[in-house]
Each structure stands twice: as C-alpha cells, then as structure tokens.
Amino acid sequence: MANLERAPRKSFNDLIYDLIFKNYVWQSIFRTGYPNTPRNQMLAVATNVFLHLHPTRIHRTHVKITHTYCLGGLSFFMFLGLTVTGVLLMFYYVPSIERAYQDIQELEANVRFGQLLRNMHRWMAHAMIILVLLHMMRVFYTGAYKPPREFNWVVGVVLFILTLLLSFTGYLLPWDQLAFWAITVGTTMVGSAPVLGDESKFLLLGGFSVGPNALIRFYTLHVIGLPLVISIFMAVHFWRVRRDGGLARPL
Amino acid sequence: MVSRAAAAIRTRPRREREQEVLVWPDLVFIEFISALIFSIALMVLSAMVNAPLLNRADPDTTPNPSKAPWYFLNLQELLLHMEPAWAGVIVPTIALVLLAAIPYWDRDTQGQGVWFGTKFAGRLTVFGFTAATLITSLLIIWDGSLHVVWTENIIRGLGLNSDFSWPGGLDWFRNLRGFDTGIPWESLGFTIGGFTMFEDWRAIPLGIPGTTTDPWLLNLNFPSFLSQQIIPVATMVGLPVAFVVFCKMLGWIQTRRDIALLIFSAFIGVYLTTTIVGTAFRGQGQDLKPPWDIVVLEE
C-alpha cells in the first residue's frame, strides 16, 4: 500500500523549473505563475506597471498588423532605445568645443562597442523620424483623427515637431564639419523669420554664430530639456488613446 | 461643443465580447516581436554602417554645398525658390498649423478606423501624390533652368543650329528669377491723368512722404517682390485649389474628408520630392546635379 501513495518522481526538467520559478525570490517579484487563464491574463496586464498602458482586451481587428503596422509603438520603442544609448554616450562625452570632437573620436577608437553605440544612437534617431512620419500617415489614412480624437492628433503633431527638434539638437554634438555647418544652415533659416528672427536665432545659439554657447545649449536641450517635454506629451498622447476609446473603429 | 467628443464615444455601439481578444498574449506578443525585429535590424545596420564623422568643426572652412540635416532639406530646397522668410519659417509654420487643424475642419465621424474610408479615397490619394510629385519636380527643373540647357543641347545636337542659345525674348522664362531680370521693367512705366506711375519699378515708394518709418517700408522692389514672393505664394495657394477644383469636376470629392485626403497626399508628395531633391540632387552652389556627380568641396 505504501508504494501506491508515493508521489511520482519528478523529472529533471521539472526540478529545474521548480528551482527557477518556484523559489522564494522569484515569487517575491512575480506573484503569480505564467498567466494561463483569461482572468489571470487580464490581471497580468492590468496589474503590471509596464503593461497597464494597455486595456485588458481589445477588438480583434486592432491586432491585425496591417491595421497599424505597429508604427506608433515602434516610435516609442525608438525613444526608449535612444534614451538607453544616449545615457551610455553621456558617460564618454563632454559638451565643450575643446573636448567634444576628441571625445567622439576616442569613443569610436578606444571604447569597447563605442562605435556600435554611436551608430545605434544615430540610426535609431533617423528611424524614429521616419517612423513618426509613417505613423502620422497611418493615422491620417485610417481617419483615426476624427472625433473624439481631434486633440490627440494635435498632440501627435507636437510630438512630431519635438522629435525633429530632438534630432536637430543632437546633430551638433559631434562637433565635426557636418554638424557645425548643418546647424549653421538650420539656424540661419530660423534667423530669416519675420520680426523675431534675429532674436530667436540669438536665443537658440547664445550668440551670433555657432560656438561654445550653442553647443552647451543644444546639449542641455538634447539630453534633458526636450526629453522631459516630449515625455509629458507622450504621456498625454498614450493616456488620450485609452481615454478616447482605444484605436479608431468604424461606427 | 463640449459634449461632441463625449457623444461620439457614447454613440459607439457596445462592443460584443466575441469580437475581442486578450491583450496578453495577443497584443503583447506582437509588440515584443516587432521590438525584437527592430532591435536586430538596427543592430545589424549599426554593425555594417558607421555614423559619419568628418573633420573637426572649423568655422573658417565652409563646405560647398552646406546642408542642413536631411529632414530639413525640404525647407532648404524651398529656400532656393523664394524669400527666406517664407521658406524657412512662414510656410512650415502654416503647414504645421493646417496639419494640426485637419480634425477641427473635417469633423464627420464617418469613415474612421478603416484604410482609405471613402469611395474615391484611393484615386484621390494616388492622384494627389503623383500629380504633386510631378508638378514639384517640373517646377524645380524649371527654376534650375534645366529646360534651357536641355533645349539648347537638343537643338545643337540635332544639327539644326549649332550656335543656338536660349532666345533673349524668352529670358523671363529661364527660371523664377527671370521674371525679375528678364523683363525690361525700366520701360514699363505708364501715366494716368498726368501722373507718371512706377517710373522706377525697383523703388516704388510705400512710405508716406514726410514721415519716417522703417526703411523696408519705404521702397518696394517690385520685380524682386514678384519673383520671390507673389509667384511662389500664389503657386503654393493656387495649385492645391486647382487640385480640389479639378477633382471636384471629376466627381471624386464628396466630403471634406475627400479634400483632406487629396491635399494631404499632395503634401506628402511635395514633402518627399523636396526632401529627395535637397538631399541627393543638389551639388556645389546648390546646383541641380545627379547624385553621382555631387562632390563636397571645402572652401
């Protein structure tokens, strides 16, 4: 009789599984196991700080790739990637005209994965602009700006402008010929504005031409000023997507 | 007005549960995969292509051509064809304001949530994009005087006239500046009732005699004003209007949404064309050149 009551022996895989997922530390982080019932799956989304931007259920047409092509989400993903690579770049970069260019050269030559890091940051920045533009086209051509989403479209236009400004302010930082003259051309265009042109250009550059003051202004705007502002607008943008009833659907 | 948005939500039919899927796993999975694909693609791109780094910035050495970042090259392209204040600031500002204003003008809630939701949306999109791209390219070619070069080369090449050059009588049609420099403005003054009007078209007094105002208010260089401001602005306003009228005549436009589709598509066409031309077809002195002939000189 005793033999029959003995529990079946655990396989090696089960032992490993239990060791990883059923120990005290793991369960202090993830309170439940893998959510494998609809109820638990909804709770997983609603109670997770990162996932709770989502609703728990959505209309089935909205998970079709061809409806959104994930463009908005990918724009946000680019922002996250740019933040990570940007923070890493800040370890190696000093925004002074004596050091900036040299720092980039040394980053590329002496830092392990330094060149890759810089490449990632640059191509992600370009990708973000393209993705934001495509996202705007997607929203337009699916008529998703119509009531009640008028204001979120406006927030989106603001986010587009902020994306361009973030990229533009970052463009100066390597302090090479490409950066210097691109910003010179760009700020000259600002200077041609009627009435407030010269004043705006002076405010942007901290002087009459691109120099040390411009570098520190662009750097500060690039690493803290504009990211803070765009984060606020993104928060509003995502919040309004939820408040306005998720993605647009035919009435 | 306040309740318009609220009403739009309230009138939405209650979703049937069967039409819904769970965000976990259906959506979270897609998001994860797309993020993964992009991470890998960007990693591969970054491993293969290095970000550019030229010589250290030198204010005394100007590269020719000097270009803004690529996403502003559409504006730099406009700069070549009109007064800088229009190209660099006023036009983009108006474009962005109009863009943001679309939903406040096209308020009909019908046709949302589906791609190209109106009957003629496809045609309007294709027509707006293609026609705007073509017309913009032709205007750029004209203002770059390429038609002059091409005509001369063709007539010489065919052996019709080996010394042929663009006729002086058509100087005004060389490019936009031609309206300024190619017309004998000096001889165009006329008299009305004993008063000689516009003896000097290049210094038309606007200020009131005996008062002092800003100098720029005092005299107007009309030929330059015509070529740098009136014609470009009239083109930018007139062409969209012509597009709308044309499509209305074809019966393609039935709602405001149709007009928005047409103009937005045309805008995308112009935006792309000017960006591509500014990026790949502008060489030294911002002359039109094929991409493989573009060399950057440092001067």
Image (cartoon, coloured by chain):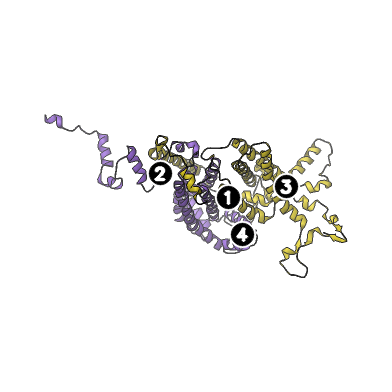
Chain colours: A purple, B yellow
Callout 2 and callout 1 share a chain: no
Q: Which residue is mark 2?
A: A55
Mark number displayed over residue B143: 3
> Are labels 1 and 4 on one chain?
yes
Q: CA distance from mark 1 to mark 4?
A: 41 Å
Q: Amino acid at mark 1?
A: Ala
* Residue linked to disc 1: B101
Q: Residue B276, how many percent across, how many down? A: 62, 44
In primary-sequence order, the first of circles 3 and 4 is 4
Compute the Cα span from label 2 to label 3. Answer: 53 Å
Q: Secondary structure at mark 2?
A: loop
Question: How many neighbours does mark 3 have within 10 angstroms: few (below 14), some (14-19), or many (20 or more)?
Answer: some
Which mark is nearer the camera, 2 or 4? Answer: 2
In this view of the protein, which residue sits in the foreground, B247 or A122?
B247
Q: CA distance from mark 2 to mark 1?
A: 29 Å
The subunit letter for the residue under badge 4 reads B
In the rendered image, the residue lying farthest to the left is: A1
Image quadrant in which the N terminus of chain A is located: top left
Return the x and y of residue B16 as percentages of the image width and height: 41, 36
Residue A75 visible to the viewer? no
Q: What is the number of the mark on residue B59?
A: 4
